[in-house]
Amino acid sequence: EDTIFVAEKIYENELPYTYQNAEHPYIVGEDAISFPEGTALGEHKATAYVEGEHCTAVLELTLTVEKSQGIDNIFGDGENVHKVLYRDVLYIIINDEWYTAAGQKVDDPRE
């Protein structure tokens, strides 16, 4: 049996979490690797059988759950413009639309 090692990192507000990967799909009938809401902060290991390239493989997942990083409001100009820090990245929110500090429009990173 081959072993496939995967490491994932999420924030606690992203729980519950289920590992899904099209490259290594679960074997039909096997339970998926999942972590419920309230899973403790820190590192967790779990294994499952998945379809490997030529055979069944063991997937070993290491999941690190970190404390959520909320939005820190750095500057607000009225209700329409906010400069915020989210996950150590600076954004500018104008009328609920998100932009990078360089002015490029991006999707809301919290979604």
Image: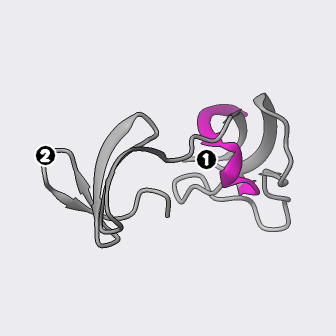
Q: Position of residue 96 (x, y in %)?
A: 35, 71
Q: Which residue is mark 2?
A: 102
Q: Position of residue 99 (x, y in %)?
A: 23, 57
Q: Which mark is residue 39?
A: none
The numbered mark, 2 or 1, whose residue comes first in the sequence reads: 1
76 relative to 42, above or below: below
> What's the amino acid at mark 1?
Gly
> What's the amino acid at mark 2?
Ala
**Marks 2 and 1 close (CB-CB < 8 Å):** no
Q: Can residue 48 be found in the magenta stretch?
A: no
**Image point 13% across, 46% down: which residue?**
102
Quarter of the rendering containing residue 17: bottom right
Q: Position of residue 53 (x, y in %)?
A: 54, 47
Q: Is 30 displayed left or right of 25 in the figure? A: right
Q: Write the start and end of the magenta stretch as one range.
A: 1-17
Q: Is 29 displayed left or right of 76 in the figure? A: right
Q: Which residue is mark 1?
A: 52
Q: Of residues 17 and 31, which is closer to you in this image?
A: 17
Query: If the image is split into quadrants, where does the N terminus sit?
Result: top right
- Main SS, magenta residues: strand
**Image point 61% across, 47% down: which residue?**
52
Q: Secondary structure at mark 1?
A: loop
Q: Position of residue 38 (x, y in %)?
A: 86, 48
> How many circles with numbers are drawn on the protein?
2
Q: Residues within 10 Å of mark 1 (few under 14, many from 20)?
A: some
